[in-house]
Image: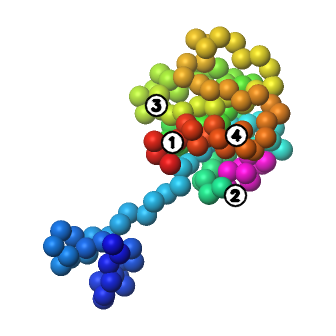
Amino acid sequence: MVATGPAAAKHPGALPAGNGSAQVPLAPVEEPLVLIAEDDPHIRMTIELVLEGEGFRTLLAVDGEQALQLASTELPDMILMDQSMPKIGGKQVLASLRQREQTRHIPVLILSGRSWGSPEEWPGAQFLGKPFNSDELLALIRQALEPIA
């Protein structure tokens, strides 16, 4: 039920509180924020365009160091990360993310054109081999974000 009347004009989308006499503004629903950590500018831009075209908000990192910094300060809903990046590799970034209380819960999708190693080396991460298509990528992202999306 959407509120109507003079108060609704002040708070579009507000719902009546309890007895309907006061208006309670609804918090805007934000789309999930995805950190894209990829050193290849063409792949990074392609992923950004695909995700933004589907309504996701994006953050971009060009190396592992920047990925760690953005993950810690922006707390994205999900991280897409190249396995092999400059400065700090994907495995080390993932280990640091899992050690930090504020980032250990963030789903991580590793993008890789190489062998991945054992699951113990990549705790809690999913993998998507390169090259990949946008449907595969979006399906894995939506699956990982299902509880919040």
Kindly state the secondary structure of the residue where label 4 is placed.
Answer: helix
Which one is earlier in the sequence, the residue at label 1 or at label 3? 3
Which one is earlier in the sequence, the residue at label 2 or at label 3? 2
Query: Within the magenta stretch, is there residue 94?
Result: no
Kindly state the secondary structure of the residue where label 2 is placed.
Answer: helix
Give how far across and how far down residue 65 sits, in percent: 64, 31
Q: Residues within 10 Å of mark 3 (few under 14, many from 20)?
A: some
Q: Residue at x 46, y 45 (%)?
A: 148
Q: Residue at x 66, y 55 (%)?
A: 54
Give how far across and how far down residue 70 sits, in percent: 57, 40
Boundaries of the magenta span: 45-53
Query: Within the magenta stretch, is there residue 52?
Result: yes
Q: Is residue 51 visible?
A: yes
In this image, 87 relative to 119: left or right? right
Q: Residue furthest front?
A: 1
Residue on which the image places disc 4: 137
The residues bearing labels 3 and 4 have C-alpha atoms spaced at a distance of 20 Å
Residue on which the image places disc 2: 53
* Disc marking residue 105: 3
Q: What amino acid type should be assigned to the residue bearing mark 1?
A: Glu
Are the two marked residues, 1 and 2, in contact with CB atoms closer than 8 angstroms?
A: no
Kindly state the secondary structure of the residue where label 1 is placed.
Answer: loop
Q: What amino acid type should be assigned to the residue bearing mark 3?
A: His
Q: Residue at x 35, y 75 (%)?
A: 2
Are the two marked residues, 2 and 3, in contact with CB atoms closer than 8 angstroms?
A: no
Kindly state the secondary structure of the residue where label 3 is placed.
Answer: loop
Figure check: 47 above or below 107: below
- Say which quadrant the N terminus sits in: bottom left
* Disc marking residue 146: 1
The residues bearing labels 1 and 2 have C-alpha atoms spaced at a distance of 19 Å
